Image: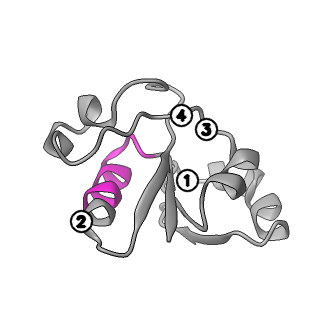
Amino acid sequence: MRVGVFGASGYVGGELLRLLLLHPKVEVSAATSNTYADEYVYRVHPNLKGQTTLKFIKSDPFKMADLCDVLFISTPHGVSSSFMSHLMEVGLKVIDVTAL
């Protein structure tokens, strides 16, 4: 299963990546961060060095449906409300772990 983490440079995103990278039935196909786009994930999350060579990509919710089957959202409060309806329309499975 291809999984993406939207907002992967923060604490929650980093923990999601750590757990997902260890999962035997998951391929982490995308990790987004506007601040760190084109940087290796392990540069922001040093604990992941040696576990992945994935690079952060720009946060584009409209591309995520092509890149993954399941998308975890770990953005700051209220950010996901601007694009959640599009993700649901295209049929992407979404797990939102943002603050309430």
**Mark 1 or mark 4, which is nearer to you?**
4
Please name the residue that numbered disc 3 is placed on.
Answer: 59
Left-right relation of 67 to 90: left
Is 12 within the magenta?
yes
Name the N-terminal-most of marks 1 and 4. Answer: 4
Whole-number angstrom distance, CA of label 4 to CA of label 3: 6 Å
Q: Which residues are magenta?
A: 8-18
Residue 34 badge: none
Left-right relation of 22 to 31: left
Q: Are marks 4 and 3 in contact (CB under 8 Å)?
A: yes
Mark 3, secondary structure of its residue? loop
Q: Are marks 1 and 3 in contact (CB under 8 Å)?
A: no
Above or below, comparing residue 42 to residue 70 in the picture: above
Q: Residue at x 49, y 26 (%)?
A: 37
Front position in the image: 87 or 75: 87
Mark 4, secondary structure of its residue? loop
Residue 57 badge: 4
Front position in the image: 72 or 49: 49
Name the N-terminal-most of marks 1 and 3. Answer: 3
- Residue type at the position of mark 4: Ile
Q: Magenta region's main secondary structure?
A: helix
Residue 22 badge: 2
- Residue type at the position of mark 1: His
Please name the residue that numbered disc 1 is placed on.
Answer: 77
List x then y, in percent, for residue 98: 50, 61
